[in-house]
Image: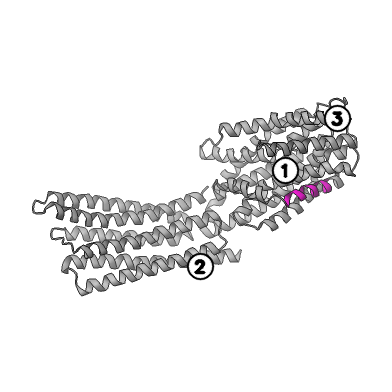
Amino acid sequence: MSKLFGEFDKLESDFNDLTEMVRICMTKSLEALFLYLEEGESERVKELTDIVHEHESKADGKRRDIITSILNGSLMPHTRSDMLNLIESIDDIADFSEDIIDEIIFLGLEFEYLEIEKTKEMKELLLEQYNKLTKGLKLLFKDMDQALVYAHQLEEIESKLDDIEEELIRKVGQNEDLDTASKLSHRNLIKNVSDLADVIEKVGDVIEIVISVRRG
Amino acid sequence: MWYLLSGIYLGGTLGANDAANIFGTAVVTKAIKFKTAALLCIIFVIIGSGLEGAGGMETLGGLAEQTLLTAFLSSLAAALTVTLMTVLELPVSTSQAVVGAIIGGNLLTGTVDFTPLIPIVLAWILTPIGGLLISFILYKLYSSFIQQKINSLKYFETFVKVGLVVAGIYGAYSLGANNVANVIGVFVEAGMFEPQLGGIIGGMAIGLGIFFSRGVMETLGRRITALTPLTALITVIAHSITLYVFARIGIPVSSSQAIVGAVLGIGLVKGSNMMDFDMAKKILFGWIGTPSVAFIIGMVLNLIFL
């Protein structure tokens, strides 16, 4: 029994480490994005993207460690499979965050007509959504009912981000100063930021499934 | 003593098949290792057989007067039926095969008493219904009283793992108490043993089969586990309670049909109909097909050897 408890305690601690690495990867990616919008590909942007890459790699390493630990442990097959899904979905957040910043820097895109304030609002919502995700994940190991509450809140925030996304993309579409290529690159950036909320929400979906299976 | 060989053979097939319903889920979910599960199963099957197996022996004994030869032939007919149907991959119940074999093997000698047949058949029909009702009630009780108390992954997993082992032990006891009569009842009726000693010997015969149950345990265990961890646990407990109730009543029933009923009970709580045509066909075949085949084999053996 103590072996099983110990295994869960280690899993909980590993998840905390993983979510922290992913959090740094995501927040630095968003910081780099807004800095890039203000000053282009500066030294500071480069520093931030290096941090993003570093933490994405760390998260990958942690993910592998956790998988090995789960496969060598004595969890029930259902729990193994659920935990592996959860890890993969958390890791997707880091991958997606890295892709967002890499894409605009590698392509050297410019976004002169982007509504910065509204886009920042999206960023704040993303950070709030991620905070709720980490709380939900912690609670999964202690209080599944509360974890479910947080998982539902992730959907609500994702929905708010969808609304802002639509509003911003419509404005880009109506802007007569932009050519089609610029409109598409603006749309792509807005959509990528909004899609990050979908990736976070998917972790919430996995949490809901984990709990539903245990509710019979 | 060689007459007992057919009983040991039958006990072996019963153990190999039915231990899977009891410990299959616990083994597949890694709550317990196969060797430990097999050992616990054997110990508690023998205890259940020795302590509470007599009721079923009396019921089966009441179906026909037995000599050592007719007991041997009835038991052999039942064992051959179980083997044949397992090879043909048809659903089979040892309890139902034994009843068909006893009647088929003794009909021509004119010693069959059909009176106990009514409660026996009634018990067959009530087995899946009992499993259904018990799992329904257990699920409701769990949702109302226990769910809130094990509201974390850690406690839930521990609850299920410990529960599966405890349910397995209880299931093994119930299987011994209920099904040992299938193995040894005719020999006790023939005067070979006193019921308690017969129970212990019958339990040991079942235990022999349990050693060879690994494959069936993994196959059936995976099927039951495919539900969810909680419903798998409730299914195993409901199955064990059903077997135990019928052991107290004194009628051997089908372990597999108790499991099917328990699964249906879970479906009932969830508002989904888990009964399909294939499942209904299997239950019906168990009630009619298995005893009919055993009846024919029993009669043929009787014509050849008596």
The Cα atoms of the two marked residues, 2 and 3, are separated by: 68 Å
Specify whether B100 is left or right of B163. right
Who is closer to the viewer here, A151 or B182? B182
Residue type pointed to by label 3: Ile
Q: Quadrant of residue B13?
A: top right
Judging from the image, mark 2 belongs to the subunit labelled A
The Cα atoms of the two marked residues, 1 and 2, are separated by: 41 Å
SS at mark 1 in the image: helix
The Cα atoms of the two marked residues, 1 and 3, are separated by: 38 Å
Is-magenta flag for residue A68? no
Residue type pointed to by label 1: Tyr
Q: Which mark is residue A10?
A: 2
Q: What residue do we see at 59% from left, 40% from top? A: B263
- Tag 1 near tag 2, CB within 8 Å: no
Q: Nearer the observer, disc 2 or disc 3? A: 3
Vertical side of B114 occupied by B2: above or below: below
Vertical side of A21 occupied by B58: above or below: above
Residue type pointed to by label 2: Lys
SS at mark 2 in the image: helix
Specify whether A178 is left or right of A42. left
The image position of residue B216, as x and y in percent, is: 66, 47
Query: Is label 1 on the same chain as label 2?
Result: no
Specify whether B189 is left or right of B45. right
Q: Nearer the observer, disc 1 or disc 2? A: 2
Q: Quadrant of residue B105?
A: top right
The residue under label 3 is: B304
The residue under label 1 is: B244
The image position of residue B107, as x and y in percent, is: 84, 26
N-terminal-most mark, 1 or 3:
1
- Tag 1 near tag 3, CB within 8 Å: no
The image position of residue B256, as x and y in percent, is: 66, 40
